[in-house]
Image: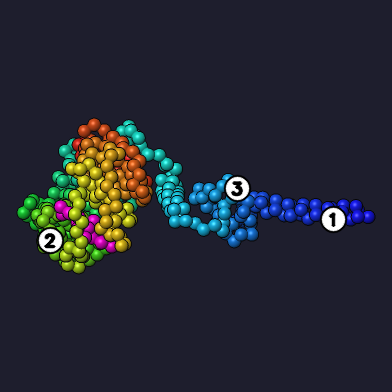
Amino acid sequence: MNHVRQLKRRLLLLVSALTVLISISVGMRADTGTCNGASITLPFTDVQASNIFFCSIAEAYFSGLTNGTSATTYSPTQPVPREQMAAFVTRTMDQSLKRGNRRAALKQWWTPTEPGALRAVTFNPGSILHDIVCDGEDLWVSDESGVVFRVRASDGKLLGTWTGATGARDLIAAAGRIFVAASSGTTTPGKIYVINPEAAPGAVTVFENDIGANPYEITFDGANLWTTNLSGSISRVNVGTGIDSTFTSGFDNPVNIFWDGTSLWVFDGQLKRVDTTNASVLQTIAISGGTMQFDGTNLWLSDYNADSIYIVRATGGLRGTVMATLTGNGLFNPLGMAFDGERMLVCNVGGSVSLFKAADFTPLGNVSTGALSDSRYACSDGVNFWVIRYGKRDIVRF
């Protein structure tokens, strides 16, 4: 009788153990859930379909933002250290930039690696090309002889030629127009010309004929055009009223100017942040440099003489801090730069371009633009970079 009782007791214990093991094994299986009408199976045994974040975890896993804590676990309730959070954030940013740009939509995942992959648009043999911008659809190229060219970005076809922009230098596409800063000499007042893209090609129109002497670069702050003038001043012209002012105080030989959406920056032997109400200097950063570009957070300054790029924080509490100095990656007499939302391209006067990942400054390689090409300025049309080859008097699609 006792023997029978012992057998029954052992049988009950065995059944209980099997029940526990079965329930554990069920809980340890990868689960399948429904996300937006689709059946989704995750490899993680600790993420059940009943978890309200099941679909979010699935998206993060399948898009490559997370691999889990092991091949079969996600550890959904564990805290995330700051170092791991940095990995999550940077992966998310990288993926959104790669998958959300126009190159991805057009299946253009490549980057040219040799001069033969570049396609040139040639202008008049005597042209001295100075600047290139994109208005969102077409390219505009200035020629110091007084000509401005319009080029279709999709195929490089020359669409029109505007004349009369004597001394044309820097360009900007703003307020539905193309503005051209032009110099008439080192002591003669400079001019700004304007082109209406809706009108037929012809002569440019004078927008302002009395700004500081020898203007070089131009930018726009949403209301005013600003130019640096090599004579030792900067000028401001309101695009609505045409009222202009020229400021000399605080400036010696300003060369480059850029509006980053919040601040006006001028390079004048040093980097200066300028008040747009009265052109007073608000901040000075003692670095060398020259041509500027902005990636949404940082200013990039090319230093022609030092073969380097300086990265300066343009926003937030670290504004004005030099974040990094880039060298190598083929940088040689760097000058103009262009940003496509993901990559920064730097033109090297020696005849090449250098690419960097803007998010973390990773070098992405250097490509020759051909013998005697003298690469100087560039822009992006959202799909391709376009580079002025000063020595060859043409532009190339990169």
Give the residue drawn at x 20%, y 56%.
Answer: 285
Residue sitting farthest toward the left = 187
Q: How many marks?
A: 3
Amino acid type, label 3: Thr
Residue 239, picture quadrant: bottom left
Which span of residues is magenta-colored?
258-273
Q: Are marks 3 and 2 in contact (CB under 8 Å)?
A: no
Specify the quadrant that holds the N terminus.
bottom right
The image's colouring method is rainbow
Residue located beneath label 1 in the image = 9
Q: CA distance from mark 1 to mark 2?
A: 95 Å
The one nearer the camera, 353 or 93, is: 93
Q: What residue is disc 2 on?
A: 250
Which quadrant is home to the C terminus? top left
Of residues 181 and 295, the one nearer the viewer is 295
Q: Is residue 337 above or below residue 120?
A: below
Mark nearest the camera among 1 and 3 is 1
Residue at (9, 51) in percent of width and height: 184
Pointer 1 local density, CA inside 10 Å: few below 14, some 14–19, many at least 20: few
- Most foreground residue, 98 or 217: 98
Instruction: Estimate the spatial distance between the alpha carbons at disc 3 and disc 2, rounded to whole Å.
Output: 63 Å
- Mark 1 falls on what kind of element? helix
In the drawing, does residue 155 fall left or right of residue 389?
Answer: right
Q: Which comes sooner in the sequence, label 1 or label 3?
A: 1
Picture disc at residue 72: 3
Residue 264 among those drawn in magenta: yes
- Residue 1 as seen in the image, left or right of residue 141: right
